Amino acid sequence: MMVSPLSSARFPVPLEWGVAPGPEAVPAARWLVAAIVREWDVPLADDAFQDLELCAGEVIANALLHTGERCVVTVLRCARRLRVEVTDGCPALPRRERGAEDTGGRGLLLVEALAGAWGWYPAGAGKVVWFEFPEEHEAPCPTYGWGTALGLVVA
C-alpha cells in the first residue's frame, strides 16, 4: 500500500515531499499542494485558492526547469498564514526581472503580484524559494458589535 504525504500527517505538521525532475511532474505537485490546503481546511477565498495553485505551479516549475534536478516542496501553516517552500540545489538567485523581448521567465513577477509575501534564502548548496498567503477569517462587525463581516482579514 502506498502512503502519500496527505494521508500520513495532519496539521500543524509541515508536509514535505520530493518532486522528480521534468515538467510532467509539475501538475501532480501543484495538485498535492492544493489537496493539502483543502484537507487542512485553510480559510482562503476562491480567488486566493486559485492564486495559490498558480503560484505553486510557477515556483515548482522554476526549480525543476533551472536545475534539471529533483526539488523538495514543503507546505506549512503558522500564524494565520499558509506557506509553500520549494528547495532546489541551484545556488543561482531567483530573478524576477526579464527583458521585454523574453518569451518566458515571468513566473516570479506573477508570484509577487498574487501572493501575500514571497522571498528566498540560501539552503546548503542551493536555495529555498517561498511564498505565503494570509488566511481569511470572519471578523465581528465593528459598527454595532453583532453579526460578522465576511471576507475581512483578521491579523
Image: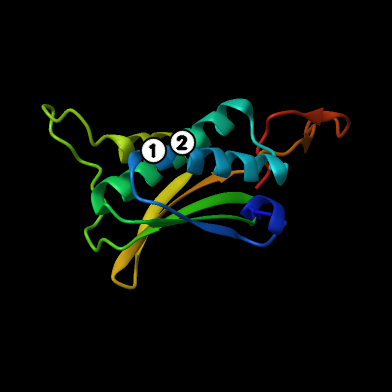
**Vertical comparison of 144 with 80: above or below:** above
Q: From the viewer's perspective, tell me whether residue 89 is left or right of residue 15.
A: left
Amino acid type shown at disc 2: Pro
- Find numbered disc 1 in the image and state the secondary structure of the residue it sits on: helix
Direction right: furthest residue: 146
Q: Residue at x 34, y 50 (%)?
A: 21
Relative to 124, say whether 51 is above or below.
above
140 or 41: nearer the viewer:
41
Question: Going by the picture, which residue comes out furthest to the front?
Answer: 1
Q: Amino acid at mark 1?
A: Glu
Based on the displayed image, in which of its 4 quarters is residue 24 positioned? top left
Marks 1 and 2 in Cβ contact (< 8 Å): yes
Question: Residue at 68% across / 29% down in the picture?
Answer: 151
On-image quarter of the N terminus: bottom right
Secondary structure of the residue carrying tag 2 is helix
x 25%, y 43%: residue? 96
Q: Which residue is mark 1?
A: 24
For label 2, the residue is 27
Can you see residue 117? yes
Whether residue 11 is visible to the viewer of this picture, yes or no, is no
Report x, y in % for residue 95. Answer: 23, 47
Indicate left or right for 132 with 13 as reference.
left
Between label 1 and label 2, give the one nearer the viewer.
1
Q: Looking at the image, which is closer to me, 34 or 96?
A: 34
